[in-house]
Structure formats: structure tokens, C-alpha cells
């Protein structure tokens, strides 16, 4: 897990130097995080060969769905950035409503997939997996929190 923290920090700091634009930056960052994350999950899970054979396909399925939901969040962040200098109360409400919908979608996805993971492994290992996922998400969220400025009241 320590390697993941260092890897993500490095990627988030240096990727911007090589990307041509925001979309390139995000895609390069997402791909590197995806690779680093998978290695960290493998280390955290310490799966047997038998567990691996059922875990990784479900992991990939879950993460593909998470990618789709996180793309919605990325697009909402872009919308926020595009409207930052001309933010209205209506737009702010719209963005907040979209973020809440995305949060609900993420929670629903986690609940659904937790049930699936428990079917293929002991609950303790399923919980460990979601703990690792949450730690990684916290790192990414912390970086986003540093990068995204707070709303300013328009005068």
C-alpha cells in the first residue's frame, strides 16, 4: 500500500508535465492509477490461486463500472471548471445535484458488488478489498480537494 501512495503521488504530480491537455492528463493519470491500484490490491489481498481465479474477473467488472461512474464525476468537475468564473446559483445547484446523484450511484454500486464479492470469498476478504479501495479513493479525493477551488460568492 505504501508503494501505491508513492506511485499515485508521483503520477499526480508529474503527469501534467507530459499531457497535451486536460483530457490527456486525466486519461494518462487514470491509466497509471489503474495499474498501480491493481498491484496494490494484489498486495493487500494476498489471494490464493483459487481465490485469484474468481476475484480478478469480478474486480475487472466492478472497476469497469466504477470507471463509467467516475467519468460522470470527471465531467461534472469539468463543468464546474468551465463555469467557475460565471457561476450562478442555478448552475451551482445543478452541479451539486449531479454530484449527489453520482455519490448515490457509487454507493449503490458498492453495495451491489459487495454482495457479489461475498459470494466468491469470505466476508473478511471482501471487506479487506473494499477497505483497500476506500484508501485508494481517499488518496485520489484528497488530491482533487487540493486542486478544486471552493465556490466564491458572486457579487
Image (cartoon, rainbow, N blue to C red):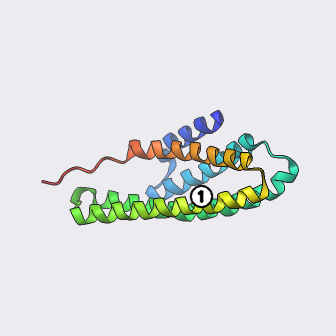
Residue at the (68%, 63%) spot, across then down: 61
Q: Position of residue 69 (x, y in %)?
A: 52, 63
Q: Is residue 6 above or below residue 92?
A: above
Left or right, residue 148 beside residue 41:
left
Asked whether 30 or 94 is in front, the reply is 94
Residue 74 placement: quadrant: bottom left
The residue nearer to you, when weighing 3 against 14, is 3
* Horizontal side of residue 94 vs 70, given as left or right: left
Residue 31 sits in quarter: bottom right
Task: Return the x and y of residue 73 as percentages of the image width and height.
Answer: 45, 60
Outermost residue toward the left in this view: 155
* Res 111 → quadrant: bottom right
Question: Which residue is at a point 67% across and 47% down the rendered structure image?
Answer: 127
Residue at 51 percent of width and 64 percent of height: 105
Q: Position of residue 106 (x, y in %)?
A: 53, 60
**Residue beneath disc 1:** 110
Residue neighbourhood size for the residue with mark 1, other residues' Cα within 10 Å, grouped as few (<14), some (14–19), many (≥20): some
- Report helix, strand or loop for mark 1: helix
Residue 144 appears left or right of 4: left
Question: Residue 144, relative to residue 58: is it above or below?
Answer: above
The residue under the point 49% across, 53% down is 25
Judged from this view, the residue extending furthest toward the right is 50
Closest to the observer, 3 or 22: 3
Amino acid at each position: 500500500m505504501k508503494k501505491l501512495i508513492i506511485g499515485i503521488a508521483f503520477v499526480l504530480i508529474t503527469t501534467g508535465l507530459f499531457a497535451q491537455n486536460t483530457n490527456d492528463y486525466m486519461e494518462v493519470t487514470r491509466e497509471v492509477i489503474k495499474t498501480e491500484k491493481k498491484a496494490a490490491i494484489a498486495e493487500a489481498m494476498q489471494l490464493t490461486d483459487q481465490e485469484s481465479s474468481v476475484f480478478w474477473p469480478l474486480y475487472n467488472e466492478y472497476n469497469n463500472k466504477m470507471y463509467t461512474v467516475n467519468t460522470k464525476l470527471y465531467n461534472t468537475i469539468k463543468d464546474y471548471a468551465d463555469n467557475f468564473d460565471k457561476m450562478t446559483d442555478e448552475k451551482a445547484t445543478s452541479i451539486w445535484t449531479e454530484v449527489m446523484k453520482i455519490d448515490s450511484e457509487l454507493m449503490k454500486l458498492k453495495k451491489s458488488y459487495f454482495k457479489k464479492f461475498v459470494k466468491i470469498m469470505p466476508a473478511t476478504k471482501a471487506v479487506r478489498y473494499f477497505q483497500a479501495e476506500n484508501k485508494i479513493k481517499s488518496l485520489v479525493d484528497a488530491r482533487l480537494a487540493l486542486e478544486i477551488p471552493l465556490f466564491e460568492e458572486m457579487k
